Image: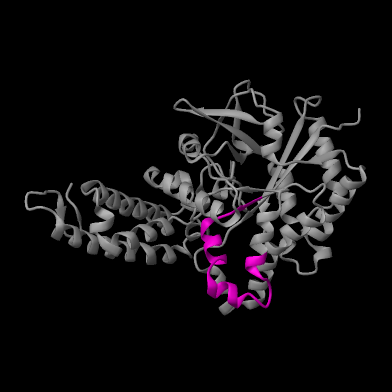
């Protein structure tokens, strides 16, 4: 039987750690050019194949923040017109824009009290830049835990993409080619499993023939081969030589994407590109699932234990340090309803530094990038000291609970 109901949701994840675009243009201009061109290609190819191409692109808030920086715009102008590029994303109705945490945090490793702000601020910036509200969420590093569901729904998200190896369907049948419903504390969201193996090929190199044959083989051997099949592939969109290849005919868009779209346009490909928002409007999930806490695989790690980001003693100490500062901030806020105003710029500065310290990149590279995290936590601690002094001076004489250097237990 020739399949005509295999759909493909192709996703690209875009992120740079705080200040990285400036650092690259200063210290490694060639790498800076490789990366910025990755962002520019997406809307250009989406426009070229507007009739058939369907893509998903997620930007971290901290990357968008850099792309909006007038200095970055000016310094990259000789390579890419960044404002024009962002406008092309805005106009591309065949690109479904996906939300993520503002500072790209590993949500299972950061304090739950910080989840809502990471979610809301990232979503609001996407809306401001692109004029569209993201319906779907891509967890940074695909690090997901069931406890995120109420926070995601409260933030306005309708579905979340997770690594398929962590999906545990209620019927006990592993099937990554269909969406599911996942619930936590009475709140439910649609879960879309990512196919890990084909996604790994998307990240490292593939061609349309291999992709077609692999997808046909995998869906034919799936538990429900005669049902509608949805294959979801997701990878970084600017990491690795495959995406950064400046000779476009040898990279992702020239070697794979354009020929793939030509086949779809000619009607010779049995796989139909789709936007998840559209697909989920037609194919409503009915099967419930649990999702095991975990992330995507990196190198030799499976992603099941988050060891890439919390496997060493120094990584775990850094995670604990951020949590301690976050708790200190929230105690300060609870002490005074007007803490943000009475604490002055210091408390706002502390808040930004704490959230920025939650950036996954500071943990990703083992212990080597942890100094970047510590630089922010040191400054955040000093800012909280300053805010506490300012608040203490403004509290009425009978107020209790404040002490210099932190809140009383």
Name the colour scheme.
one colour
Relative side of 208 to 378, left or right = right
Q: Name the foreground residue: 98 vs 309.
A: 98
Does residue 101 show up? no
> Is residue 351 toward the left or the right of residue 94 in the image?
left
Residue at point 82%, 60% (across, down): 254
Q: Nearer the viewer, residue 283 or 210?
A: 283
84 or 18, nearer to the observer: 84
Can you give x and y, in whole percent of width and height, for residue 163 in the image? 62, 41
- Looking at the rendering, which quadrant does residue 41 occupy? bottom right
Q: Quadrant of the N terminus?
A: top right
Q: Is 66 contained in the magenta span? A: yes
Magenta residues span: 57-84
Name the spot of residue 106 as percent of width and height, x first.
49, 49
**x, y percent for residue 174:** 67, 28
- In the image, residue 32 lies at what x, y percent? 63, 72
Residue in the image at 80% along x and 51% along y? 50
Q: Residue drawn at (48%, 64%), measured in percent from left and top?
A: 369
For residue 316: magenta? no
């Amino acid at each position: 039987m020739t399949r005509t109901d295999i759909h493909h949701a192709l996703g690209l994840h875009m992120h740079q750690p705080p200040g990285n675009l400036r650092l690259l243009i200063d210290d490694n201009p060639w790498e800076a050019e490789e990366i910025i061109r990755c962002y520019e290609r997406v809307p250009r190819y989406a426009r070229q194949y507007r009739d058939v191409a369907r893509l998903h692109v997620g930007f971290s808030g901290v990357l968008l923040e850099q792309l909006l920086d007038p200095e970055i715009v000016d310094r990259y102008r000789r390579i890419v017109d960044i404002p024009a590029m962002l406008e092309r994303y805005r106009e591309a109705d065949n690109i479904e824009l996906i939300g993520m945490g503002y500072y790209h945090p590993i949500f299972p490793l950061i304090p739950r009290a910080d989840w809502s702000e990471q979610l809301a601020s990232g979503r609001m910036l996407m809306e401001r830049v692109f004029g569209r509200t993201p319906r779907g969420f891509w967890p940074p590093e695909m690090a997901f835990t069931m406890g995120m569901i109420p926070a995601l729904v409260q933030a306005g998200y309708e579905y979340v993409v997770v690594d398929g190896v962590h999906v545990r369907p209620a019927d006990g049948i592993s099937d990554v080619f269909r969406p599911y419903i996942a619930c936590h504390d009475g709140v439910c969201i649609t879960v879309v499993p990512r196919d890990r193996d084909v996604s790994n090929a998307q990240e490292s190199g593939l061609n349309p023939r291999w992709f077609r044959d692999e997808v046909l083989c995998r869906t034919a051997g799936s538990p429900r081969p005669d049902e509608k099949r949805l294959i979801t592939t997701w990878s970084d969109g600017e990491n690795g030589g495959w995406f950064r290849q400046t000779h476009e005919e040898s990279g992702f868009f020239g070697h794979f994407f354009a020929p793939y779209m030509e086949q779809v346009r000619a009607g010779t490909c049995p796989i139909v590109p789709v936007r998840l928002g559209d697909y989920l409007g037609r194919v409503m999930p009915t099967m419930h699932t649990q999702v095991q806490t975990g992330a995507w695989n990196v190198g030799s790690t499976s992603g099941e234990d988050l060891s890439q980001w919390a496997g060493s003693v120094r990584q775990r100490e850094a995670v604990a340090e951020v949590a301690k500062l976050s708790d200190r901030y929230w105690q300060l806020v609870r002490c005074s309803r007007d803490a943000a105003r009475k604490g002055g710029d210091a408390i706002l500065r502390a808040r930004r530094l704490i959230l920025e310290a939650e950036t996954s990149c500071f943990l990703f590279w083992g212990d080597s990038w942890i100094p970047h995290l510590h630089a922010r936590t040191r400054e955040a601690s000093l800012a909280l000291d300053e805010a506490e002094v300012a608040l203490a001076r403004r509290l009425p004489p009978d107020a209790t609970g404040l002490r210099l250097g932190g809140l009383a237990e």
